[in-house]
Image: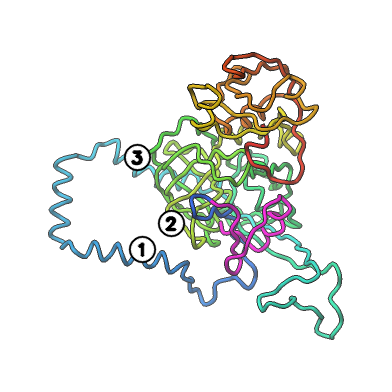
């Protein structure tokens, strides 16, 4: 799940300007002074591990491990056993807890056939003046001294994960892994390799559906209810970190509704289940064996896991699957406003007692909101019966609305509540990832 060199073109095309940190690793979005990484670990032929030796992923992680070991070194084995015995006496392990932990074995066996390895080959066009690792153009001339062709290109190969969602061979994965790929190869759990094609993709939520033809019925993963997840609940991640097929890790749900700034519809599940480069597109599973998320990004200073991973909630994905299968893309509702967070200071200046709602900062001319009479400085508190908690919530609510549908919008203006009628427009794709607040 690292950002591959091949992801550079895709992310640049989507409006994100990645900055290279080290060979094959790109940072794409900031989050609390750390960097959120897409996790489609793209392997170049030159990136393969030599002599079966795994490279160190970061000095910081090593130092952290040393610090922990030094701290634990203060306790003797006798002390550790005494502490463990005391904890057992104070809080006996319930049968439910034992059953929950042992279920990981059953889940790993049950879900192994549904998780696949995905290899995507992309062609990257090299612009004139492309800067190489030595500060000069990469191969400004060919080996015979001739100038490089104006449209020179090179191939990059990315590796990630996916999981089967239909017996007909439909596979769910991340769009940043397969978008724009010239060739996609899927490796099943039995070792069989098949070519796949993209049948639907959405770069706003970073999901894609690819399909393979096997001539046989496949095992599909059950899709669960991410809305029912609780913070602290056990989950399991399955994928192909660093190309290691069907690796299983476990952890808990650390938080829900995380906004990373990597896209307009961020609503991530945070987990401490270990996810690494190559896990991108793999499932996050609850103890019932249901997929509750798609592993997509990590926060790390090194590009390797530090216990902070993020998964797209499966409920958001399930809403889009019918459109992706039928039309190959997603059509979203559009209101035509830019909004910002309503701070206590702004609320006080407007004479509002609450900070709930989305503050309108700009209205698109001749857009749905403009025609409905919405103005800058209005505070949208409800849309079509759905309370608007803040500026981040509004785009998700509007996007779910069918185009041309009539809806009521409740706003606060001059200390009064008004209800306006609006006709939902269609959000047009521009090829650029906008901030969530700009897509209301």
**In magenta segment, residue 12:** yes
* Residue 190 screen position, x and y as percent: 57, 54
* Residue 32 screen position, x and y as percent: 48, 50
Q: CA distance from mark 2 to mark 1?
A: 10 Å
Q: To which residue does mark 3 refer?
A: 100
Q: In the rendered structure, are the residues bearing label 2 and label 1 in contact, judged by CB atoms less than 8 Å apart?
A: yes
**In magenta segment, residue 211:** no
Q: To which residue does mark 1 refer?
A: 64
Q: Is residue 410 above or below residue 361?
A: above
At a point 58% along the width and 53% down the height, the residue shown is 38
Report the number of numbered marks: 3
Q: CA distance from mark 2 to mark 3?
A: 24 Å
Q: Quadrant of residue 359?
A: top right
Label 2 Cα neighbours within 10 Å, binned few <14 / some 14-19 / many ≥20: some
Q: Quadrant of residue 435?
A: top right
At a point 41% along the width and 64% down the height, the residue shown is 61
The answer to whether residue 115 is left or right of residue 91 is right
Q: To which residue does mark 2 refer?
A: 306
Q: Secondary structure at mark 2?
A: loop
Which portion, as a residue range, is magenta? Answer: 1-30
The disc label shown at residue 225, or none: none
* Residue 46 screen position, x and y as percent: 63, 73
The quarter of the image holding the C terminus is top right
Which mark is first along the chain, 3 or 2?
Answer: 3
């Amino acid at each position: 799940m690292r950002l591959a060199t091949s992801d550079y073109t895709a992310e640049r095309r989507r409006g994100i300007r990645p900055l290279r940190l080290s060979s094959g690793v790109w940072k794409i979005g900031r989050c609390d002074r750390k960097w959120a990484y897409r996790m489609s670990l793209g392997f170049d032929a030159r990136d393969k591990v030599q002599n079966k030796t795994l490279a160190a992923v970061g000095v910081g992680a090593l130092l952290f491990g040393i610090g922990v070991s030094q701290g634990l070194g203060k306790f003797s084995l006798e002390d550790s056993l005494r502490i463990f015995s005391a904890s057992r006496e104070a809080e006996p392990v319930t049968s439910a807890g034992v059953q929950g932990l042992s279920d990981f074995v059953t889940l790993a066996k049950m879900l192994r056939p549904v998780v696949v390895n995905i290899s995507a080959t992309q062609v990257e066009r090299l612009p004139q003046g492309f800067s190489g690792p030595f500060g000069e153009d990469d191969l400004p001339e060919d080996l015979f001294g001739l100038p490089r062709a104006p449209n020179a290109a090179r191939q990059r190969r990315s590796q990630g994960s996916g999981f089967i969602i239909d017996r007909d061979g439909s596979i769910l994965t991340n769009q940043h892994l397969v978008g724009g790929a010239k060739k996609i190869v899927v490796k099943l759990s039995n070792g069989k390799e098949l070519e796949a094609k993209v049948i639907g993709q959405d770069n706003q939520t970073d999901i894609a559906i690819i399909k393979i033809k096997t001539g046989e019925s496949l095992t599909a993963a059950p899709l669960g209810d991410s809305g029912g997840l609780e913070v602290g609940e056990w989950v399991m991640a399955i994928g192909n970190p660093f190309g290691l097929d069907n690796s299983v890790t476990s952890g808990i749900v650390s938080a829900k509704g995380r906004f990373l700034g990597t896209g307009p519809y961020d609503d991530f599940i945070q987990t401490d289940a270990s996810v690494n480069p190559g896990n991108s597109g793999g499932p996050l599973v609850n103890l019932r064996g249901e997929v509750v998320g798609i592993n997509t990004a990590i926060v790390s200073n090194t590009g390797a896991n530090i216990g902070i991973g993020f998964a797209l909630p499966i409920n958001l994905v399930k809403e889009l699957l019918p459109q992706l299968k039928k039309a190959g893309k997603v059509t979203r509702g559009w209101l035509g406003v830019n909004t910002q967070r309503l701070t206590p200071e702004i609320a006080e200046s407007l004479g509002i007692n609450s900070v709930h709602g989305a503050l309108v900062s700009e209205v698109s001319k001749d857009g749905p909101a403009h025609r409905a009479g919405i103005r800058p400085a209005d505070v949208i508190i409800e849309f079509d019966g759905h309370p608007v908690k803040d500026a981040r919530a509004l785009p998700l609510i509007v996007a779910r609305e069918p185009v041309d549908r009539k809806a009521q919008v409740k706003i606060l203006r001059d200390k009064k509540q008004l209800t306006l009628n609006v006709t939902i427009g269609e959000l047009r794709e521009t090829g650029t990832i906008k901030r969530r607040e700009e897509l209301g």
